[in-house]
Amino acid sequence: MNGIHDMGGMQGMGPIEYEEKEPVFHAPWEGRVLAMTRAVTATGKLQGGLRPPIESLTAFEYLRMSYYEKWLTSLTVRIVASGLLTRAEIENGHTAEGSTKSVPALSVADVPAFMRRILPMRKDDVAPRFQIGQHVRARNINPVTHTRLPRYVRGKAGTIERDRGVATLPDTNVYGLGEKPQHVYSVRFSARELWGDQAAAQDAVYAELWDDYLEPA
Amino acid sequence: MGTTRRDFLTTAVTLASATTMRDDRAHAEEHPHQEVPSDLALRVKSLESLLVEKGLVDRAAIDAMVDVYENKVGPRNGARVVARAWMDSAFKQRLLTNGTAAIAELGYSGEQGQDITVVENTPKVHNLIVCTLCSCYPWPVLGLPPVWYKSAPYRSRAVIDPRGVLRELGTELPSDVEVRVWDSTSEERYMVLPERPAGTETLGEEALAALVTRDAMIGVAKVDLPHVGGRG
């Protein structure tokens, strides 16, 4: 989606507001939101990805909300959409009578291993469509869904730098509409290809792009 | 706490009206150290209670996870990785070949670090990491990202004007250096291996790690020796 979140290359966002000795969380609730998001996700009952509800915010809301406020919004929207709590329960602040505990929650004993786990790489037998060193062009597409193809590379030519192996396609997988496993590549774009002569000739931007985002140049 | 509670819970689903939130924020700015729970804090507390009642969340597990984020992960982990690479060329080679595996040798792994690529700064190449679409960041080695890294000014400009971003944050790059910006659009995460500063030949691994900053591992700064007589 060509939303405000896809902001690479935009100008006019103001100076970087750097905070010295920044705390990990600026208020205790921020840490609770992050940890709850991970804990509910770990139950396997939370549908959808973190980002689509955030990317569906209006540009005004997106820029107004703090980072963890956006996470809270996404968690709440997905909890309701997944049927884990009803809208009425959230509005009333207590669970409906007769509601049952359906799943074992992530326990405190599970936390150390959960926080350090490395998931195995996918082993799908999918052939790469492109080879290292090959010239490619990012497709000029404008999906209305979640996508990891940033606007600033669309239609631009680059070179396959590395093959990262196989991953599911977020554009469909995040909605449960198909994993579409395929190769992901690190693609090098020269800064001048992206931004014209104002960029230094030797500079470059690398983006990680899925097979479906690319075509031969 | 009936009516009030219902009010803030409603906003959790429907999104708060801009007016309410503006008032809330203006109030917070007037009283930066106030102890009164904010509307957001109350919404989160209530949501947590509901999730605990439903058996979806164990409060002790949430406490333990917050403790990990606040006290166990952070840029000190990454600094140890960098110092080890500066001291041990075989480790450095493994780090640049398979970042995730080499980093795991030091005991660091987990969410947002399933695939970590370490990119090396040299006198000719300067690397910078960003996530233009969201906030991707290598948690096991750098901890959670600072607010500025997730903010619109950094995300928008890092790809189009990396030299300007560095200048704004206090580092001027020579014009003949190649700047490589890494946009974290997939599950791949990046960490910059900064250049080891001259004059550190006699330092041990721990002393070297103490020099390495979070910003140097994002690529918005270089590693400097502390100024003589400075804060060290």
Image (spheres, grey):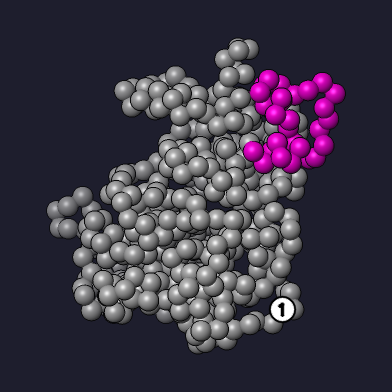
Residue B72 is left or right of residue B201, and the answer is right
Magenta-highlighted residues:
A77-104
**Which one is nearer the viewer's eye here, B87 or B71?**
B71
SS of the residue under disc 1 = loop
Please tell me whether residue B143 is drawn above or below residue B17 in the rendered image: below
**Residue for point 23% across, 53% down:** B232
Residue A6 is left or right of residue A172, and the answer is left
**Dominant SS type (magenta):** loop
Residue B59 is left or right of residue B15, and the answer is right
Q: Which residue is mark 1?
A: A126
**Residue for point 73% across, 30% down:** A86
**Which one is nearer the viewer's eye here, A20 or A59?**
A59
Q: Position of residue A147 (x, y in %)?
A: 58, 60
Would you identify the image quadrant in which residue A103 lies? top right
Residue B138 showing in the rendered view: yes
Mark 1 is on which residue type?
Answer: Val
Please tell me whether residue B162 is drawn above or below residue B69 in the rendered image: below
**Residue for point 35% across, 74% down:** A191
Q: Does the magenta-highlighted stretch encompass residue A138? A: no
Residue B52 showing in the rendered view: no
Q: Does the magenta-highlighted stretch encompass residue A102? A: yes
Q: Residues within 10 Å of mark 1 (few under 14, many from 20)?
A: few
Q: Position of residue B70 (x, y in %)?
A: 48, 43
Please tell me whether residue B57 is drawn above or below residue A54 in the rendered image: above
Chain letter, disc 1 residue: A
**Which one is nearer the viewer's eye here, B188 or A78?**
A78
Would you identify the image quadrant in which residue A34 lies? top right
